Structure formats: structure tokens, C-alpha cells
Amino acid sequence: MWLRNIQISNFRNFSHFELEFSSTLNLFEGGNAQGKTNLLEAIYCLGRGTSFRTSTDQIMIKWNRDTLYL
């Protein structure tokens, strides 16, 4: 399965984020605490239905929000 794009709302440090993937190679680059691992976790959650970082879904929801959307 190919992931063409992702839209993330209220997930960890993302309020709203949209990304369209290349069909060849995608690299994630950025400073510390900018959301690289959170993006990978969101992609993982789409495929597996759970996080590789926590067993508690509530921890993945952005602070002071009720729901998240992937």
C-alpha cells in the first residue's frame, strides 16, 4: 500500500498538518522537538491502529483537545 498524503489534527505537537508524499523517496529533516518522530508515529498509527511509543491513546491527543484526526 502506498501512502499518498496525510492530514493530521490535534496529534501530539501538530495542531493541523498536511503532507503529500513523493512516489519515490521521502526524507524527514528538522531540529530537535519539531515533530519528525510524531509524524512517523502518526503514519504507524494509521497502519497498525496503535502507537509504538505509548499504550495510552489519550497521550497522543494534543494538550487541551478532546480528539485527534489522522
Image (cartoon, helix red, strand yellow):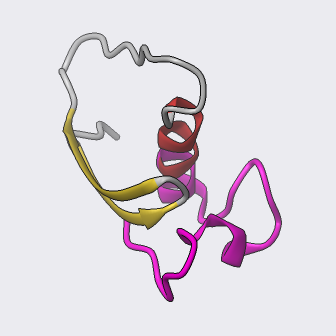
Residue 63 shown left or right of residue 58 in the figure = left
Instruction: Please tell me whether the stretch drawn in magenta is mainly helix, strand or loop.
Output: loop
Residue occupying the far bottom of the picture? 66
Number of numbered discs overlaid on the protein picture: 0
Name the residue: 34% across, 40% down.
Answer: 1
Residue 9 counted in the magenta span: no
- Considering depth in this image, is 46 or 70 the residue closer to the camera? 70
Please state, as top left, top right, bottom left or bottom right, where the C terminus lies in the image: bottom left
Instruction: Describe residue 58's horizontal placement relative to residue 1 as left or right.
Output: right
Q: Find residue 6 and report its horizontal and vertical position in percent.
A: 27, 49
> At which x and y percent is residue 65?
49, 82
Of 22 and 15, nearer the camera is 15
Q: Residue at x 74, y 48 (%)?
A: 52
Q: Residue 46: image x %, image y %?
A: 47, 57
**Residue 51 among those drawn in magenta:** yes
The furthest residue to the front: 64
In magenta, the rendered stretch is: 43-70
Whole-percent x and y of residue 60? 62, 65
Using the rendered view, name the quadrant where residue 7 is placed: bottom left
Q: Residue at x 82, y 66 (%)?
A: 55
68 above or below 70? below
| Relative height, residue 7 to residue 41 (above, below) | below
Task: Name the residue: 59% across, 22% down.
Answer: 32
Foreground residue, 51 or 13?
A: 13
When asked about the image quadrant of residue 20, the answer is top left
Q: Does 22 sit left or right of 35 as displayed?
A: left
- Is 14 displayed left or right of 5 in the figure? right
